[in-house]
Image: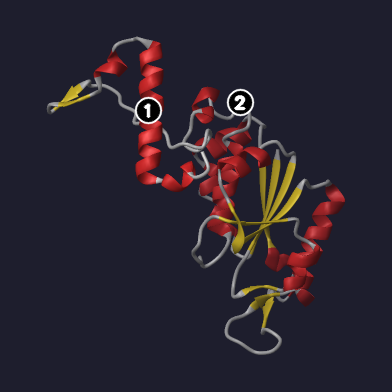
Amino acid sequence: MRIDIISVIPELFEGFFSHSIMRRAQEKGLAEIVVHNLREYSVKQTGRVDDYPFGGGAGMVMQIEPIDRIISMLKKERNYDEVIFTSPDGELFGQPMANELSLKKNLMILCGHYKGVDYRVREHLITKEISIGDYVLTGGEIPAAAIADAVVRLLPGVIGDEQSALSDSFQDGLLDAPVFTRPADYKGWKVPDVLLSGHQKNIADWTLSQQIERTRRLRPDLLEGK
């Protein structure tokens, strides 16, 4: 999979993609993540990619011309399954969407910034708008990194134990069950006996009951309609 990310502050991604699972995915050749500096495509090469909004109002707006330039350039090199725009009013990102995107070959993510982006970008150049929550961030770099991380870790071979990714919270619409490791007794705080029993059916039953209980208590919205 290849993910192209367009940003006005590409330096923000340097540490994130050069460590841990994201680095290993790239070293294995399972994912290619390329970050582009939108300022390199600015009008008259000034580095400026924003301007005042027509009609007045506070804040600055990302211009359509530099965005169209870089998207058009990238599209000449390959076909993209989705051209994504990170926006607080986009479709809420969740595990089902991450699963869906992990099946794609080429993704492009445009990071929002300033007051917003010239709406013609959203009308004519974007295929999918994604939000990671009902709040506003300084820019779309954090959402882009979150989307890339959630998608890349699902690619076959990225995580050593692929069952680990398949059993993550939200994969089956439930939160994950509590997990424990050694020692089994620490300061009198004990691991549930069932997990030490070796009885796989009882462990599976306990795990499911804990998933349902934690989801009902912490995220009852996930159980609506079930």
Front label number (1 vs 2): 1
Amino acid type, label 1: Ser
User: In the figure, residue 7 lies in which quadrant?
Assistant: bottom right
**Left-right relation of 204 to 187:** right
Asked if residue 193 is positioned above or below residue 23 in the image, the reply reads above
Q: Is residue 62 left or right of residue 191?
A: right
Q: Position of residue 126 (x, y in %)?
A: 75, 59
> In the image, is 158 to the left or to the right of 221?
right
Secondary element at tag 1: helix
Residue 119 percent across, percent down from the top left: 73, 72
> Local crowd at mark 2 within 10 Å, few (<14), some, or many (≥20)?
few
Amino acid type of the residue that numbered disc 2 sits on in the rendered structure: Gly
Q: CA distance from mark 1 to mark 2?
A: 30 Å
Task: Name the residue: 34% across, 43% down.
Answer: 217
Q: Is residue 111 above or below residue 226?
A: below
| Mark 1, residue position | 209
Q: Position of residue 33 (x, y in %)?
A: 65, 45
Kindly identify which residue carries mark 2.
157
Q: Toward which corner of the image does residue 105 lie, by quadrant? A: top right
* 194 and 189: which is toward the camera: 194
Q: In which quadrant of the rendered image does the N terminus lie?
A: top right
Q: Going by the picture, which residue comes out furthest to the left?
A: 187
